[in-house]
Amino acid sequence: MFPLAKTPARVKVRIWENCGYFYVLRRFGECWESISRHKTRDRAATRVELEMQLMDWAEDVKMRAHYTCEVPGCWERDKALLHAHHKKPKSTNPEDMLDPENGECVCIWHHAVRHWANKVVRNMILAKLGFIEGVRKHPEDKKLVA
Ligand SMILES: [Zn+2]
């Protein structure tokens, strides 16, 4: 059956202060990844707020696609492998960043294909594969299965 309920947010966000900088960290499996660095706590807090909104946006996009890669013929349904892709990039269209219509649910492979022209972004996406086992081992996964 298609999971129609929203996935509980496994990924958490927090601020980490180090050497005078404020880092926004995002939980990824058993690891924390740094997503941005700020000079003030206020700015970091603003980024945390946006990150939470983006996580909600991503969850809405995936739920709308019934947690299935939307590339025709793919049918990937492993939640650990699904990403929400911005059709119009955040960098050039920040006003559409949280618009569900600007989102597409794709598997990690097709997400890498979407960003193939940009080697840095492509590798950042594919690097997440190294953490997939960690994601599956996360205790929250048991709740998802039950
Ligand atoms: Zn796919």
Image (cartoon, rainbow, N blue to C red):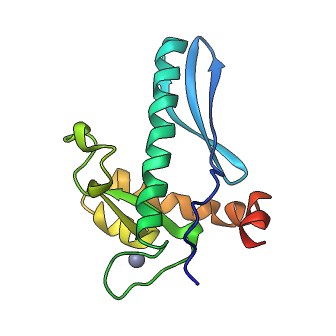
Task: Give the total of numbered labels.
Answer: 0
Vertical position of residue 60 compared to residue 54: above or below: below
Report the residue at 49% width, 47% height from top.
Answer: 55
Q: Position of residue 16 (x, y in %)?
A: 64, 24
Q: Quadrant of ligand 1?
A: bottom left
Report the side of 111 relative to 21 (left or right).
left
Report the side of 131 relative to 110 (left or right).
right
Vertical position of residue 55 compared to residue 36: above or below: below
Q: Position of residue 21 (x, y in %)?
A: 56, 16
Quadrant including the N terminus: bottom right
Quadrant including the C terminus: bottom right
Residue occupying the far front of the picture: 5
Of 94 and 125, which appears nearest the observer?
94
Report the residue at 68% width, 61% height from top.
Answer: 135
Residue occupying the far bottom of the picture: 73
Report the residue at 32% width, 69% height from top.
Answer: 113
Residue 129, quarter of the rendered image: bottom right
Residue 12, quarter of the rendered image: top right
Report the side of 140 relative to 27 (left or right).
right
Of 115 and 67, which appears nearest the observer?
67
Of 23 and 87, which appears nearest the observer?
87
Q: Position of residue 68 (x, y in %)?
A: 46, 76
Vertical position of residue 133 compared to residue 51: above or below: below
Residue occupying the far left of the picture: 92
